[in-house]
Amino acid sequence: MRPPLVLVHGLWDTPRVFRRLIQALEDSDQPLLTPHLPHRLGAVPLRQLARDLDRQIRARFGADQTIDLFGFSMGGVVGRIWLQELNGAQRARRFFSVGSPQHGTLTAQPIPRALLPGAADMKVGSALLRDLGRSSQALAALDCRSYFCHWDLMVCPYWTAQLPWGDQQVIDVWTHQQLISHPRALNVFREHLTAA
């Protein structure tokens, strides 16, 4: 049996964003956790969301169970914080980052940190992303994969969605939301997630 799969949603989303992906995986024997991480429209700092993620993973799977981690949009950055700063890399096997602003996004640049610190964490050059860049060696032992589309207006420019480690793959869709809902994307994820 494959280790559990944890699906981490992004900004303005809930676990419902994974409904189609879960349907595509319905014949998999992999246990699933889709934690709800209330972000208050970007008011909750991403490190706090990572601590919330850690609590939910520990409550469901204990402190040692190996897991696979899949983050969509902001959820990929939250997942990366958990991996690099909360010792998640010690128990994760694979990390799938989908349309996640791992190097920031120009879309976040105008957001005032005083009002929406979580959203402002995704600015290009934010203190959080600089810290993650300095400690990215923690990801080197994992099977890391980055997925993105060229026309994403939420994570732009598109290359900011690439992790510093692992494989990168362009998904042939037009929008950010299609990265988690379009059949072309779901087929890719199903193939990769169900691989041994």
Image (tube, grey):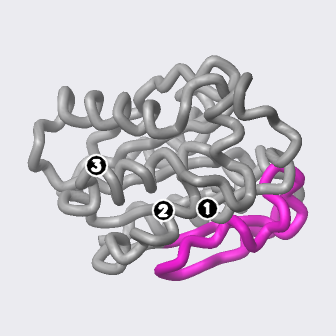
Q: Local crowd at mark 3 within 10 Å, few (<14), some, or many (≥20)?
A: some
Spot occupied by residue 178 in the image (x, y as percentages of width and height): 78, 49
Residue 132 is labelled as: 2
Which one is earlier in the sequence, the residue at label 3 or at label 2? 3
User: What residue is drawn where x is 42% and y is 51%?
Assistant: 81
- For the C terminus, the image quarter is bottom left
Image side of residue 185 versus residue 82, left or right: right
The foreground one among 194 and 142 is: 142
Residue 86 is labelled as: 3
Spot occupied by residue 86 in the image (x, y as percentages of width and height): 28, 48
Which one is earlier in the sequence, the residue at label 1 or at label 2? 1
The foreground one among 193 and 129 is: 129
Q: Disc 3 versus disc 1: distance between alpha carbons?
A: 17 Å
Q: Which residue is mark 1?
A: 102
The magenta span reads 145-173
Residue 107 among magenta residues: no
- For the N terminus, the image quarter is bottom left
SS type, badge 2: helix
SS type, badge 1: loop
Q: Disc 3 versus disc 2: distance between alpha carbons?
A: 12 Å
Q: Are marks 1 and 2 in contact (CB under 8 Å)?
A: yes
Q: Is residue 86 above or below residue 38?
A: below
